[in-house]
Image: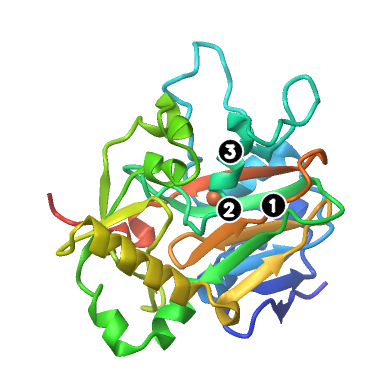
């Protein structure tokens, strides 16, 4: 089979056909996938048969597996693949105001994952496991395409500046109670350059997230207003791809150049996506966003 691609959006993202992800290894097909990832920022593979083990293997090809619970796990407990889900341990779905649902709702704010971690993530590989009959889309916005087309006066306001990120900041927007949970307060504030230059092709992207709370040189209110303006510009329909899930879909994107969000669904319907993030390494150009303390 030959690999073929079809655009998801005129500016970024492709659906890839002619690849069974179960066949992918470091030598076989991954180099082509990685090249498409650098070029297009988001890749969709439909109707894939990817086990949890294979999911982990694919993520490891991109970089070290991100493990936010490493410090909470007792000896002998294994890494479990994170689930974006409203299904509770007893199989019922969580209620509208449960903390689990509120946390899902924080994912409805545009963000890049893990900008609040000391080592942020390169990619999120999402797999549709249980899907809904309506709603529950995952939407992607290219901050690379948006930055390239942004008016110069808006670019000027953020170029060359650092942006501060904090996990609990995005949770506080949904619920102050949620923001207080220890899991959202484990890491110190992170300070990253506003622009992430791709080390392979030199293309720049705005590195933005709902976790961002301050831009250097602006006070809190000014920062909030500017972050809102930048996010609004980047998430205009022209720069967005909205994915409606089917079981077996695999959607992955470059966190350096894409923001994403979930959309609501009727919460009595179970919905589960498996999600593994891989961390960036020096080869992915983390030096481009690092700011000396
Ligand atoms: Fe996310």
Q: Is residue 83 visible?
A: yes
On screen, residue 76 above or below 64? above
**Residue at image point 48% right, 59% down:** 255
Image quarter of the N terminus: bottom right
Report if the CB atoms under discs 2 and 3 are less than 8 Å apart: no
Q: Secondary structure at mark 2?
A: loop
Query: To which quarter of the image does residue 249 belong?
Result: bottom right
Q: Which residue is mark 3?
A: 102
The foreground one among 152 and 205 is: 152
Q: Left or right? Give the position of 246 relative to 61.
A: right
Q: Secondary structure at mark 1?
A: loop
On screen, residue 208 above or below 55? below
**Residue at image point 74% right, 63% down:** 45
Residue 78, given in percent of the width and then of the height, sits at 58, 21
**Residue at image point 77% right, 62% down:** 244
Residue at the far top in the pictured view:
75
Q: What is the number of the mark on residue 264?
A: 1
């Amino acid at each position: 089979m030959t690999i073929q691609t079809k655009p998801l959006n005129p500016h970024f993202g492709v659906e890839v056909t002619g690849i069974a992800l179960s066949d992918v290894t470091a030598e076989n097909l991954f180099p082509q996938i990685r090249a498409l990832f650098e070029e297009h920022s988001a890749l969709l593979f439909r109707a894939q048969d990817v086990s949890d083990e294979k999911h982990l293997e694919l993520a490891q090809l991109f970089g070290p597996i991100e493990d936010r619970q490493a410090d909470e796990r007792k000896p002998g407990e294994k890494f479990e693949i994170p689930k974006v889900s409203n299904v509770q341990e007893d199989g019922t779905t969580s209620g509208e105001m449960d903390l689990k649902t509120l946390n899902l709702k924080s994912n409805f704010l545009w963000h890049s994952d893990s900008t609040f971690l000391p080592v942020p993530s390169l990619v999120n590989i999402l797999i549709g496991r249980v899907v809904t009959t309506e709603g529950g889309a995952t939407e992607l916005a290219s901050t690379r395409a948006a930055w390239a087309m942004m008016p110069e006066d808006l670019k000027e306001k953020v170029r060359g500046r650092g942006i501060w990120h904090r996990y609990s900041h995005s949770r506080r927007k949904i619920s102050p109670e949620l923001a207080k949970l220890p899991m959202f307060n484990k890491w110190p504030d992170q300070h990253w350059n506003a622009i992430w230059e791709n080390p392979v092709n030199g293309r720049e992207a705005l590195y933005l997230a709902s976790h961002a709370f301050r831009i250097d040189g602006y006070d809190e209110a000014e920062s909030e207003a500017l972050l809102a303006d930048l996010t609004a510009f980047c998430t205009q329909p022209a720069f967005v791809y909205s994915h409606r899930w089917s079981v077996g879909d695999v959607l992955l994107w470059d966190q350096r150049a894409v923001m994403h969000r979930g959309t609501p669904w009727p919460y009595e319907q179970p919905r589960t996506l498996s999600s593994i993030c891989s961390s960036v390494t020096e080869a992915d150009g983390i030096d481009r966003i690092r700011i000396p303390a």
